[in-house]
Amino acid sequence: MPHIPRRPWSRITSAVIVALLLPVFWSVGHALTMTGGGTVSERLAEWARDHYLGPVVTFGEWLTYQPPKVGGKPSFALTGPSAQVKKLPKAVTYGPPQRLTSMAGRPLAGEGSWRVLATAGGQPAIYGTYLRPSSVYTSYVAGIASINQSLVRFELRPGIEDPGPGNWHAASSIVPGTRQGLLATFNSGFKIASSGGGFYLNGVTRGALTPGVAAMVYYRDGHIAIGTWGQGLGMTPDVAAVRQNLHLIVANGQVPGSVDANVETSWGATLGGGYYVWRSGIGVTSDGRVIFVYGPALNVREIAELLRRAGVVNGMELDINPAWMSFMYYLNGQSANPKPVALLPTQANAPDRYYYPSSRDFTAVYAK
């Protein structure tokens, strides 16, 4: 059979296709190999959303989404371990908050009762508890932390991908030599491009600090405030950092009706478009305590109600979906290398995740 030479146009077409795909392969390879954590599927999903393929990712998540299981019991005891605390002084300045009432009905052993997670200066600085947020999906448990601002200082840390490189004057991990006094770390909000607002740290801004958007404001003395930017919160010389994300889900002690509106579009692209996914939130009580809440199978109203029940006056949603959820407290915080412990044993991330460079920004809590 005679040899039929390839036509020149076919070789040109192949060369063009290869030339077009090379940058894509390089970009995907970079996303899969860069430091900052995340599974292969999580990194591919992030890359796709950043390259206008969000609808494809959402469709794939919809196909694989598993709704929460009805009924059942938690997979772990709700008594939970306490920090390795020596005998507390007789005069405890910061006693435990009142026990929280289960939203699932009759409480299980330890449910809603506070235990000491971390101390500072011999006083309890962080308490933690577990609470079931639903009378329908009773096997799912939220973790709640209550932090005494008079004993700690909060630091916003940048992620190597979000907000990305910049003159932040802050590390993207808790590097050796800076761990003494570390009491807790927890996740931040959405990717800044999806947060509806901006990110500010030590004089540098990504996005835009937007009036009307919920904001967590970090002050130079180490305390934080949460509210609506431009309504009692604004830029002053005392502000060290600002992290904005969506709108308040608790305002003046009440849960607004907006938490039930457009859940899939207003409160984040959830796995499979489901209402019930991993969510996290943060708020401040009337006496200045900081409350952090996170857990699986939560809708927006439930994360807001958990914050409100814990006494929050103003609260905001942080990140969602399992890849980004975490709250760690640290044992032997006065050592040079304290041991991290996940508040929820069911969280996807390893407790030491912030001992390594993080792709997303996060908050570190130190003893004063």
Image (spheres, helix red, strand yellow):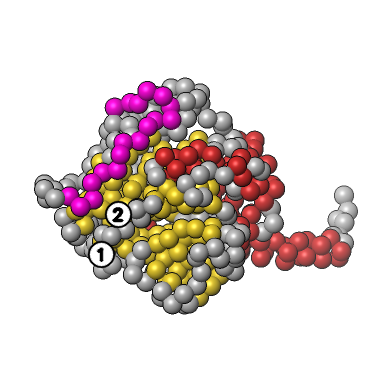
Q: Quadrant of residue 301?
A: top right
Q: Is residue 326 magenta?
A: no
First in sequence: mark 1 or mark 2? Answer: 2
Q: Is residue 58 visible?
A: no
Residue 198 location in percent, x, y?
A: 56, 65
Residue at image coords 60%, 42%: 257
Please tell me whether residue 19 is drawn above or below residue 48 in the rendered image: below
Q: Nearer the viewer, residue 269 or 47?
A: 269
Q: How crowded is the residue under tag 2: few (<14 C-alpha within 10 Å), some, or many (20+)? A: many
Residue 271 location in percent, x, y?
A: 58, 41
Q: Is residue 77 left or right of residue 194?
A: left
Q: How crowded is the residue under tag 1: few (<14 C-alpha within 10 Å), some, or many (20+)? A: some
Residue 106 location in percent, x, y?
A: 37, 23
- Which quadrant is home to the C terminus? bottom left
Residue at image coords 43%, 71%: 239
Q: Main secondary structure of the magenta part?
A: loop
| Callout in the foreground (1, 2) | 2
Residue at image coords 36%, 63%: 223
Residue type at mark 2: give it. Answer: Asn
Query: Which residue carries the number 1 mark?
Result: 368
State yes or no: discs 1 and 2 in contact (Cβ < 8 Å). no
Total number of numbered discs in the rendering:
2
Q: Nearer the viewer, residue 325 or 288?
A: 288
Q: Is residue 81 visible?
A: yes
Residue at image coords 51%, 44%: 254
Q: Which mark is residue 148?
A: 2
Q: Is residue 100 magenta?
A: yes
Magenta span of residues? 92-109
Q: Secondary structure at mark 1?
A: loop
Residue type at mark 1: give it. Answer: Lys
